[in-house]
Image (cartoon, rainbow, N blue to C red):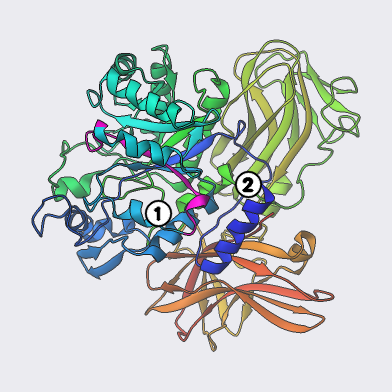
Amino acid sequence: MNTTIRTLHLTCILLLASLGLGQIPLHAVNPRGTAVGAIRWDGNTGDTPTFTSPNGSYVGQQVERALGPNQYHFRLPFFGVETGTDTVQARELTQATMDRDIIYATTAGLDYWAFVFYPDGSGMDTARNLYSSSAYKSYVNYCFVASGQMPASYFSTLVTKFAQSNYQKVLGNRPLLYIFGTGVYSASDITNLRNLTVNAGLGTPYIVVMTFSASAAATEATNIGADAISSYCSPEIDGALYSTLVSAENSNWNSYKATGTKVVPWVTSGWDPRPRIDHPVTWTSYPSNEWCQTATPWQIASHLQEGLNWVDSNPTVADANTVIMYAWNEFDEGGWICPTLYTGTDRLDMIKTILDPAVVGANLLANPGFESGTTSWAAQSATITQSTTMVHSGTDSLHISNRSAIWGTATQDVTSTLLAKGQGLYTASTWAALASGSDTIRIVIYTTDSTGSYWFTTSAMTLGTAYKQLSGVINVTWSGTLSRAIIYTQTTSSLADLYEDDFSLGMANQLANSGFENGTTSWVAQTSSIAASSTNVHNGAGSLRIYNRSAIYGAATQNVTNLLLANGQGDYTASVWAQFASGTDNVILVINTTDGAGSHWFTSAPVSISTRYKNISDTIHVTWTGTLSRALIYTQTATSLSDLYEDDFSLGKLP
């Protein structure tokens, strides 16, 4: 992403002032710069008439009935409204809402939306029209998922869409088009579309058939002359774990590849249509056992990383260099990454760690470039020596030889580092090359705690004999006492010599004890009392209770003076999960600074918080004049002095 676009993105973010950003890594973990899209099914139309359905059966009304039961309110989009215990509204009908939707997507690093196409005037074109009229549409490209709703007679109009600068292209100037299902178009229809497109001065369309069967997709692609195959999503049954869906989906990418057809891998963020099973809709139906457990944000991001690595490992098969996610906004079917009313931008925050990396703190490893030989590194089932011949940067690297096991490598003890920084997301990276052959390789953080030994890893990446950056985000946790932790690389099968250089380990969240797993350490009470809590917890085993609040700024504060001085002025991403013991009020994040010109308060946009955990997050632009002598971060209410519970605080610097 170029500097101009980045500046425009941040300008929009600051103007809208209500966006959620999360923890972000030191190094890019999208090895080929793969374009990532997300499917949009825009049924959030409320009372807008759709097709020829009678009032009461409009698509948007059926969606709201499905999401109405209280147990499904956690899925409500950020623009949703709880109108009662078991009733809701979920309506994306205004330009301001769509503009915000676009900014959320671009902030997370998404490249395009794939709109499921419905005819003009159908009511289901509402969101598409709002996108087309948005001043921000250039920040997120678009393409279509065509089906029987797009007749071949529309192709002349479609080509005018192809010609738009914000229509997603691949392989240079080839418009991307997904076709969902089989028997939708004939070979002559597709030939006509290609001719119309080329005659308009564009590259021939890159056409991808989407079906749930590899063989059916490949047959249809051959029959109509499509370029590649994919799937819309991966359903699962019997309340299976999301990890079961992921495993099956990873296997299916290879099954589709085995047909000999080009492939666009798909990444399913979830599958749970129980709202539609409980309140059936008129356009589809599901077996009662067809659903899986809700994914965590980190699981979704990790699965996306696997998709990106699959593209990197299969560049010829995945020649379009794109991945499609299910879905941006299939809330009632169980697949969404769009921000929600209660959990905010949690899913996009994790996706951002993969797609739009930013700045973290200092490299936590000693002698990371091996300029001091093997100092701070130990051999594990191998021999390690300094090398001056196979170097990525500087004058030296590390040669790992005599590897007697796939974990034969160089290790560094990071126990004290992890204890100091705490549990959470770490970004690990190294440049590596094999002396011969190729294999997949990953970075491992091996830990021992009170309950046993654990291996936390990045997704595997393909490595050959040329230096390549291996990088990823690793979610490190432990139970009880962390007694040992080491970091190293591990191959899948090769025992060939390895060369490594420029190893790094960083943590985007630069706050200490951010999850309050170490009680109140690093936090100070401000016109209040603070105590560790194990009862009202958002994540992990601990949270923070703030009570005896004598002012609206009664809070827990952390001194971030050195953090700001180290990272400099600019845009910081701040986030916290909070809930009241009683009542409701608006809450903001505050960075209070003192500099040569006085005191200043830089704040987030307010978020309405009640007695259920909700995310507060925003980009905060911090500046100072002269010497910055003091800086604190904390939360502040609008009027309430009720007790507050807080968990999972974060602060990171944007580039």
In this rendering, would 570 be left or right of 78?
right
Q: Per the image, is 142 magenta?
A: yes
Q: Which residue is outermost to the bottom?
A: 550
**Residue annotated with mark 1:** 131
Secondary structure of the residue carrying numbered label 2: loop
Measured as percent of width and height from the top left, residue 425 is found at 59, 47
Which quadrant would the C terminus be assigned to in this image? Answer: bottom right
Front residue of 324 and 459: 324
Q: Which residue is mark 2?
A: 357
Q: Could you say where residue 526 lies in the image, as x and y percent from the top left?
A: 62, 81
x%, y% of residue 192?
A: 33, 24
Q: In the drawing, does residue 193 fall left or right of residue 43?
A: right
Residue at left offset 49%, top offset 42%: 301
* Highlighted range, magenta: 135-152
Q: Return the x and y of residue 341 as percentages of the image width and height.
A: 37, 62
Q: Which amino acid does the dot numbered 1 rest on?
A: Tyr
- Is residue 543 highlighted in magenta? no
- The residue under the point 29% across, 26% down is 212
- The residue mark sitting in front, 2 or 1, is 1
Which numbered disc, 2 or 1, marks the residue that appears first in the sequence? 1
Mark linked to residue 390: none
Query: Few, some or many C-alpha atoms within 10 Å of disc 2 (few <14, some 14-19, many ≥20)?
Result: many
User: Which residue appears farthest toward the front when viewing the image?
Assistant: 199
Q: Residue at x 60, y 50 (%)?
A: 423
